[in-house]
Amino acid sequence: MTVSADGLPGTAGPVAPAPPPGLVVVGHFDQPPGYAVDRPRGADSWLFTWTTAGRGRLRHGSTEVRAGTGDLVVLAPGVPHGYAVEPGAPRWEFWWVHCQARPTWRPWLRRYDTGEGMYAVTPTPDAVHGRVEAAFRRMLADARWTGTEAPPVRTPGEEQVAVAHGTAARELALCSLEEVVLLTAGTARTPPEPGADARVRRAQGLIDADPAAPHTVRSLAEHVGLSPSRFAHLFTGQLGQSPMRALREARLRHAARLLESTGLSVERVAAASGFASPYHFNRVFRARYGQPPGVYRARGPMVGP
């Protein structure tokens, strides 16, 4: 939830320096009440935080968010920021990474922009939390990789901060962070409208989770325990579009993200998004986004997905 930035606790000490640009620095903290960091000039690198327990509060420019378990909050460079244990919370346990973000991550984060370059990716389903946590743990080990032997295995009690100095270690750590971005940004959902039928929400969730699957009105209705006719009527009345129209929109959004963030051919994007015919895909994509898929990729999106 975005609120006023007034009242964020002051620093626990002097203004905290940020790591220099170009490095990948990853750490895991479990901080008590009173912990706070303030950077009036921001940082030259991106900051990613993932909360595993307790609550934190992060300020970026004039925007502030509260972070709880399973929330990924990303701060872009060059904007004054600060973060602290949420007042009243017993602790804030979180992973953090300073790095230069890969350009391909920005389209995935864009829909979670709260203003001034802060991205609050929330809520993420509990089902992905374990895998996200494992990616951060792997990142901490990979940052210490020398490039000559297998990456080290982190042992309990080991230092909870690592700096990836070598090119190979940096790239390997960034690959784990990319997994975090994709898992969270790809699964976080906007909270449903109050009063929406739980069966409709469940069906929409099935569509959003795997738009390329061969969904039909009948298969979706069976998943939520309704007859096809009753399901189609309820879905259309609640969401203002038919189940198959919602499926096509989800497939087009998925295709747009693939075009923005991968080098897959248009034909493979079409197949990976559930379109059996590249010709049909080109036609409906152009109708939705105002330009064919190849031009969309080359020029950048004119209309957001």
Image: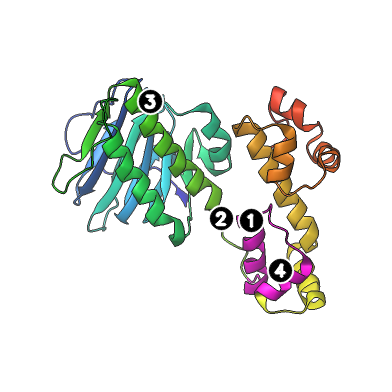
Q: Nearer the viewer, mark 2 or mark 1?
A: 1
Dots 3, 2 in contact, CB < 8 A = no
Quadrant position of the C terminus in the picture: top right
Find numbered disc 3 in the image and state the secondary structure of the residue it sits on. loop
Q: Which mark is residue 208?
A: 1
Mark number, residue 189:
2
Element type at marker 1?
A: helix
Q: CA distance from mark 4 to mark 3?
A: 44 Å
- Name the amino acid type tagged 1: Asp
Dividing the picture into quarters, in which one does residue 206 lie?
Answer: bottom right
State if disc 4 and disc 2 touch (CB < 8 Å): no
Magenta segment:
195-223
Q: Is residue 73 above or below residue 61?
A: below
| Lower sequence index among marks 2 and 1 | 2
**Is residue 227 in view?**
yes
Q: Would residue 169 appear left or right of 226 to someone viewing this image?
A: left
Residue type indicated by callout 2: Arg
The dot on residue 45 is 3
